[in-house]
Amino acid sequence: MKTLLVLRHAKSSWKHPETSDHDRPLNKRGKRDAPRMGRLVAARGLRPDVIVSSTAKRARLTADEVARHAGYEGSVHLDRHLYLASPDEIVDVLRDAGGSARRVMVVGHNPGLEDLVARLAGRPETLPTAALAEIRLSIRTWKNLAVSSAGTLAGVWRPRELPDDI
């Protein structure tokens, strides 16, 4: 049994239109929500063994803040293939990055993340910025993960639905 935590990056800034999409930072709401999601991860006992993130600035900053506030002690692994990745591309990255981890967190972008959750969980879920989905998978190793793997959606958390004290 493996657990996949799917985290969409927190809200990014459009303040400087000349900034490339890849280099957009977090806005005020994103800077507030990323630590909250990290505290939620810690409070729910979901601290990952591995975190892998898109190289986009907004995803990296989200991953770093979530990791810090969740008490994650490893390094965040960056993978350029996760930038605007399809479900198949995300699965390819997870197969390589998962290793012997029990719980892996992937930080990336829509529509790929929503599509991945829908395929693995068998039902669509809306993932606004900084939303987190927990999927339990009946696989022995990450190498066995496929977009057709049947998983169980154990939870979805969206920042606007969380209590203020998180």
Image (spheres, rainbow, N blue to C red):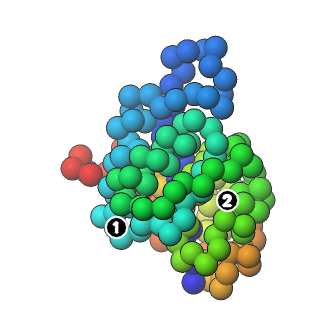
Residue drawn 62% across and 83% down? 138
- Please report the residue visible at 71 percent of the width from the left and 46 percent of the height from the top: 80
Which element type, helix, strand or loop, lies under badge 2? Answer: helix
Can residue 136 be seen by looking at this rendering? Answer: no
- Residue, x 65% and y 28% (percent of image)? 21
Residue 15 in the image: x percent, y percent? 51, 17
Query: Which one is earlier in the sequence, the residue at label 2 or at label 1?
Result: 1
Circle 1 packing at 10 Å, graded few (<14), some (14-19), many (20+), is: few
- From this viewpoint, which residue is outermost toward the left? 165
**Amino acid type at image mark 1:** Arg
The x and y percentages for residue 57 are 57, 35
Circle on res. 116: 2
The CA span between labels 2 and 1 is 22 Å
The amino acid pointed to by label 2 is Leu
Classify mark 1: helix, strand or loop. loop
In depth, the one of 4 and 116 nearer the eye is 4
Q: Residues within 10 Å of mark 2 (few under 14, many from 20)?
A: many
Q: Identify residue for label 1.
A: 44
Left or right, residue 56 beside residue 68: right
Comparing 156 with 165, the one in front is 165
Q: Is residue 62 visible?
A: yes
Q: Is residue 142 above or below residue 128?
A: below
- Nearest to the observer: residue 82 or residue 113: 82
Quadrant location, the N terminus: bottom right
Residue at the image position 54 percent from the left and 48 percent from the top: 8
